[in-house]
Amino acid sequence: MSGSAISAGNEDELRITLHDGSTRPIAMGAVTAIEQVDGPIVWLSALVPTENVQTPYFGDRASPARMDRSVTGDVIRGGAGLGNGAGSSARAFGRGVGVHAYSKVSFDIAGAGFVALRTQYAIDGDLPMADVTARILLDGQPVWEKKNIRSAQQLAPAVTIDIAPGHRTLTLEVDYGENYDVQDRFNWIEPALLRTRQPTATQPAN
């Protein structure tokens, strides 16, 4: 359901103002997510990639990136537990990009007015052999890199990258680490393009 405004009718319902000006109640328990379209945030996974490359270390069976799912098709999870099973205590995320090293996913951002990219990341589950290098590039030039990312119980702090006017292409890259591409499944978690800068803890590049 889409509308122009939303408000709380009472503790059990929301009221949606539709584009024709009428309102409609909806039970709070029926709401799974609320997303502002054309607002200050655009989820990267809602855009169509201009490039979606995955190159296995051995063989030729590619596993291209998946939007809002892990590369294996599971719900994206991160944080305590990190597992993807039904009993996992890890938090589930509705937005993200699931990949397998080596992965290169690019998006056209020319003229869109974005000022920053914010994202978190994690190895997809409890994979002891996983080891990757992740990079963020603007117009083909690396602006952030993190080496030797491995499975961890805690979700990595948010990374925020400024996007200066004139940039045309944003690329998320995940490269092989120390163990070829063994278990190198990786999730970009809630990558969001921002039209206004928001204060957030930023992890420096290594």
Image (cartoon, grey):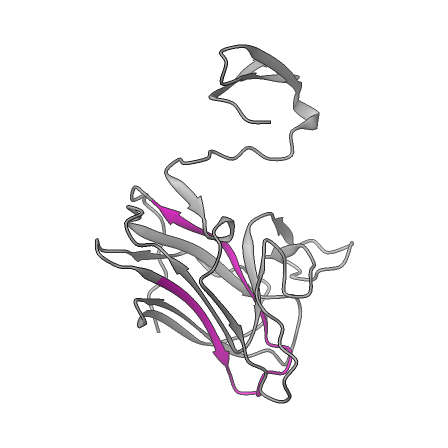
**Quadrant assignment for the N terminus:** top right
Residue 144: give x, y in percent of width and height. Answer: 34, 68
Q: Is residue 15 visible?
A: yes
**Residue 204 versus residue 199 in the image, above or below:** below
* 160 or 167, nearer to the observer: 167
Please give the name of the residue rendered at 27% of the width and 56% of the height, measured from the top-left corner.
163
**Quadrant assignment for the C terminus:** bottom left
**Image quadrant in which you'd find residue 123:** bottom right
Please give the name of the residue rendered at 63% of the width and 81% of the height, measured from the top-left corner.
129
Give the magenta range.
170-194
Q: Is residue 10 visible?
A: no
Name, please, the residue furthest toward the right. 86
Name, please, the residue furthest toward the left. 165
Residue 157: give x, y in percent of width and height. Answer: 44, 58
In the picture, measured across the screen, residue 139 lies left or right of residue 44, that is left
Residue 36: give x, y in percent of width and height. Answer: 47, 33
* 152 or 44, nearer to the observer: 44
> Is 123 contained in the magenta span?
no
**Residue 140 versus residue 79 in the image, above or below:** below
In the picture, measured across the screen, residue 80 lies left or right of residue 190, that is right
